[in-house]
Image (tube, rainbow, N blue to C red):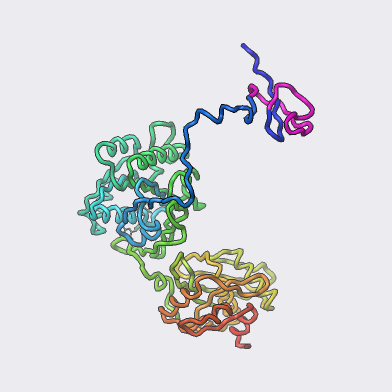
């Protein structure tokens, strides 16, 4: 047996020789040649034949015509909105969410409505028997929809069945963790099984122009169970969120190769399934009374849509020297710490001996930085036990310097507030200068806002 030839590779430039030397002949670096296994490969640049023998690749300009991908309406406007205008044919979508949040319900409703609109829809459940799904459809008032329903878990069986004749326009797999591919070993739900099953299903969808929807369970830490690679394999990842104890649900695009990820779909879980919520503001505003301190209304932006939510703060003075608690639901804990620090350092308000609780009503989650000023107003109001006027909203970003920064979509936020009957807004100075449909109080610094709330201006 021939001994493998020795090979020395320069760790700086990558060139390889069959003889060791103190200095690399190509890049002149010293002591960079290291022995590696394998035969000497002719250096890249010396292989002139690389420039022939390949097939031509089509190169186009950025300004070339781009045909829009064909889309199908899901017949549920809020679902279409989250997808960026309907389902793309030949694409794969993953919907993740906690168990019991309503993934099966949403997809069954979409499947039935699309089937009623004349689409060929197949719904494969690996979790429930066909009877159970049929009963649920009947309870949702969709029992007569011509959906092709199956209870199966073998990917080979499913694809063999659907591969005969015309492929369906829409194929729903509920859930990917129950699917099993006989191409590889392992129980359903294991990383390799989930990946292999998804791969086969996605290949079928791309080949046959079927829109594929995979349901994915979410683990306790919030990621979709199975390989992270599943999220890379699909074109769109949607997350179905909400508190099971609350009725509302939000469908959010986390990844979308065919559209933006800033639009959400809002639903309410009712007796007869998921109802669309076209005006979410009314849903998140709890019944508000006058005279309660620590509450502010904040107009959050969700994509192009403002959603009014109530921010509630509670402070409890501690007698002992124990470390006070800070608890946040629906907002970023780090951001709360920052606002508390700015209130302390720039406005002289100390929360160091008080426990602070912050809650966004309705179980809603805010990611919009414009919430800073509304949170600050709620905190000041709670600490001073002075209510923020109930007909007022607040928004603006707070900088570490204590300055209040303008935020995007000021006009849209004010318009939504006016629509819902709010008469006043506490806003950054530049927003106030531009004017709006309701009375505006503008602030340049957090100190000015504090003075205003405490009646010192
Ligand atoms: P489901 O769609 O099965 O959740 P997932 O597929 O995400 O696990 O929804 C389950 C919950 O929804 C269940 O607890 C009952 C509730 N529900 C309603 O309140 N109304 C309805 O019409 C339906 C079908 C379900
Ligand atoms: Mg389910």
Whereabouts is ligand 1, in terms of quadrant? bottom left
Task: State whether residue 117 appears in this view.
Answer: yes
- Say if 47 sits above or below 244 in the image: above
Say whether residue 320 is left or right of residue 284.
Answer: right
Residue, x 67% and y 76% (percent of image)? 350
Residue, x 36% and y 68% (percent of image)? 278
Looking at the rendering, the stretch of residues picked out in magenta corresponds to 16-41
Residue 39 lies in the magenta-colored region: yes
Residue, x 49% and y 83% (percent of image)? 424
Question: Residue extending furthest left?
Answer: 144
Image quarter (top left, top right, bottom left or bottom right) of the C terminus = bottom right
Image quarter (top left, top right, bottom left or bottom right) of the N terminus = top right
**Which x, y percent locates residue 101?**
39, 57
**Which x, y percent locates residue 333?**
59, 64
- Say if 43 sits above or below 288 in the image: above
333 and 266: which is toward the camera = 266
Prevailing SS of the magenta stretch: loop
């Amino acid at each position: 047996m021939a001994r493998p030839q020795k090979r020395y590779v320069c760790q700086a430039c990558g060139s390889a020789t069959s003889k060791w030397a103190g200095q690399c002949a190509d890049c002149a670096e010293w002591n960079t040649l290291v022995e590696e296994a394998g035969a000497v490969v002719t250096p890249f640049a010396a292989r002139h034949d690389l420039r022939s023998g390949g097939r031509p690749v089509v190169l186009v300009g950025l300004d070339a015509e781009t045909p829009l991908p064909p889309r199908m309406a899901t017949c549920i406007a809020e679902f279409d909105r989250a997808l960026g205008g309907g389902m793309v044919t030949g694409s794969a979508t993953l919907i993740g969410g906690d168990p019991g949040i309503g993934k099966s319900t949403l997809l069954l409703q979409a499947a039935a409505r699309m089937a009623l609109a004349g689409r060929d829809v197949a719904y494969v459940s690996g979790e429930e028997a066909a009877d159970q799904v049929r009963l649920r459809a009947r309870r949702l008032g969709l029992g007569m929809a011509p959906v092709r329903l199956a209870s199966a878990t073998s990917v080979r069986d499913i694809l063999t069945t659907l591969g005969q004749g015309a492929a369906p326009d829409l194929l729903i797999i509920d859930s990917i963790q129950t699917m099993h591919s006989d191409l590889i070993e392992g129980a359903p739900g294991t990383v390799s099984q989930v990946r292999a099953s998804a791969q086969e299903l996605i290949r079928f969808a791309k080949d046959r122009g079927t829109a594929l929807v995979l349901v994915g369970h979410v683990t306790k830490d919030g990621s979709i169970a199975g390989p992270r690679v599943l999220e890379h394999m699909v074109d769109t990842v949607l997350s179905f969120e909400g508190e099971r104890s609350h009725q509302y649900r939000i469908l959010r695009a986390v990844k979308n190769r065919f559209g933006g990820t800033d639009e959400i779909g809002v639903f309410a879980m009712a007796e007869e399934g998921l109802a669309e919520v076209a005006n979410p503001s009314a849903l998140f505003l709890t019944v508000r009374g006058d005279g309660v301190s620590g509450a502010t209304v904040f107009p959050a932006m969700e994509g192009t849509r403002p959603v009014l939510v109530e921010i509630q703060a509670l402070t409890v003075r501690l007698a002992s020297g124990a470390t006070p608690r800070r608890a946040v639901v629906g907002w970023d804990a780090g951001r709360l710490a920052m606002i508390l620090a700015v209130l302390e350092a720039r406005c002289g308000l100390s929360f160091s001996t008080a426990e602070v609780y912050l809650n966004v009503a309705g179980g809603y989650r805010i990611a919009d930085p414009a919430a800073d000023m509304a949170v600050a107003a709620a905190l000041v109001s709670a600490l001073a036990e002075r209510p923020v006027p109930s007909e007022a909203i607040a928004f603006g970003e707070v900088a570490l310097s204590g300055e209040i920064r303008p935020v995007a979509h000021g006009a849209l936020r004010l318009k939504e507030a006016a629509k819902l009957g709010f008469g006043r807004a506490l806003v950054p100075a530049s927003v106030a200068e531009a004017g709006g449909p309701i009375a505006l109080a503008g602030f340049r610094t957090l100190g000015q806002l504090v003075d205003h709330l405490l009646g010192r201006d």
